[in-house]
Amino acid sequence: MKTVGLDISAIRKEFPTLSRKVNGKPLIYFDNGATAQKPSSVIDRIDQYYRNENANIHRGVHTLSQEATSAYEEARITIQRYLNAKYEHEIIFTKGTTDGINLVAFSFGEMLNEGDEIIISAMEHHSNIVPWQMLCERKKCVLKIIPMDNTGELKLEELDKLLSERTKLVSVTHISNSLGTINDIKTIITKAHNAGAKVLIDGAQSVQHLKVDVQELDCDFYAFSGHKIFGPTGVGVLYGKEEILNEMPPFQGGGDMIKEVTLEKTTYNTLPHKFEAGTPNIVGGIALGTAFEFLNELDMGAVNQYEQELLNYATKQLSKIEGIKFYGQAKNKTSVVSFLIDGTHPYDVGTLLDKLGIAVRTGHHCTQPVMQFYDIPGTIRASFAFYNTFEEVDQMISALERIIPMLKD
Amino acid sequence: MSIEEKEQSIIDEFAIYDDWMDKYEYIIELGKDLPLIDESKKTDDRLIKGCQSRVWLDAEKKSGKMHYSADSDAIITKGIIALLIRVLNEEDPKDIAKAELNFIKEIGLQEHLSPTRSNGLVSMVKQMKMNALKQVS
């Protein structure tokens, strides 16, 4: 197989979960869009932290606390460099993408006035819809939607009509989790900036597939989760431009985010701590740094090329199945195939694939408006990572050929 | 037959399947065979929305016994519904309210009644018992 720059069998050995069995069959893990498996380096880092370094960070004078603080702050720098952020304090540790978006919706949202407008798209994850609906209710703002076409591409010409002098923020996904569409975010960012609006990019599905450079993109915010990029759950990153983060009021109050507290008034800490109230997910942040070190070792160009080959192969093989219908056929797509098979329900297909050791996701993928757009209850989604193989795709096809006759009349 | 006796007869039926494939084929057949609910009763107020599949449930009391009909858009869910209805139909509301329905676990289908599965079945069992309880009080 063409795997220039990637030794897939060596990479697979780095991920212990991939060697386990499910229902007596070797696991085939095609649910990477939901969460990615973890390399040994990340697992070992978590283990090592709790065995040797565990302490609360910041302001501790003892050795353990200083070591933990250094490890946590070094992780921030690793992430800053990987994303090419200008300053390390532009990297805010969060609980994940949802938390990052909520932070912006609350804090940036505090600066909005009645009648101000926010633009999202028709293919957003609920995490990039609901916080804005809540904000619009709270501040009496207006939410506008960039429509999409049947192939699952955004109608960007409509964006020009939606943007106005009242638009304060455009918040769109880099890559659709249910359709795989890679959006032309550079165009979106340019158009929004020309109209004087800021831009938040939901990067939950991106960093694991593409090299992201926040300065080159010139986005104002970029949010993603650790667990989808081979790091731990419960930790993520919100990148924000220094100037905007400085203007924004704090999101949550508590320890670490303060400069001075009296019973009458509190002054706030500087970035990034202003947005990191309370003891953070210390081990999560540190191990997320390790996940980025793992990504650093990979040739992301080769990763992207290999995943494209997997996607093309899976699409070609799946299209031989009678009655299959694909959802998301954008020209520029990441390694996600969403489909339905005539006369079968996704829940049944997913349940039987699991019996054969194959993990796919079924349902609406937290994008109910996308399912409403196509008027379907959900899809079967296979989402690939660079550790998946062509043989695994073949096995999924054989499995489908075995179970579809069981389900059809 | 009591609820427990009906549960036992299902456990006995399933004992012959040592292969998951045969077991699921049987459940799928149960799902396909049973005309579970009158189309006119598939209304929103009878709909139990799961994340993964949808379930419609209707309950009536006829001469002191509960009578259920139900349907789902997913065939495996529908097959399990067929089993639940077989066990609970024409039973006394008091007995339904306290039924433990251990047979689901015994026949190895517990995963479908896990709250995380979100297929509407957990809510359906709860609703069946609620309907019965309403008739007791």
Image: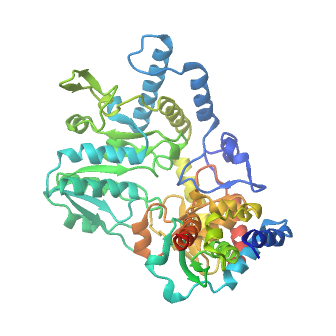
Q: For this rendering, which residue is in front, A199 or B120? A: B120
Percent x, y of residue A294: 56, 36
Question: Quadrant location of residue A361?
Answer: bottom right
Percent x, y of residue A317: 64, 70
Question: Going by the picture, which residue comes out furthest to the front?
Answer: B137
Percent x, y of residue A103: 32, 43
At x 47%, y 49%, the residue is: A210
Could you tell whether A236 is left or right of B21 in the image?
Answer: left
Quarter in which the N terminus of chain A is drawn? bottom right
**Number of marks present in the image shown:** 0
State the colouring used for the structure image: rainbow
At x 39%, y 58%, the residue is: A126
Could you tell whether A233 is left or right of B86 in the image?
Answer: left
Could you tell whether A91 is left or right of A192 in the image?
Answer: right
Question: Quadrant location of residue B11?
Answer: bottom right
Decide: is B105 above or below A254.
below
Question: Going by the picture, which residue comes out furthest to the top?
Answer: A62
Could you tell whether A37 is left or right of A355 in the image?
Answer: left
| Residue B18 visible within the image | yes
Decide: is A211 above or below A278.
below
Percent x, y of residue A156: 29, 65
| Residue A173 visible within the image | no
At x 58%, y 34%, the residue is: A42
Q: For this rendering, which residue is in front, A171 or A192? A: A171
Quarter in which the C terminus of chain A is drawn? bottom right
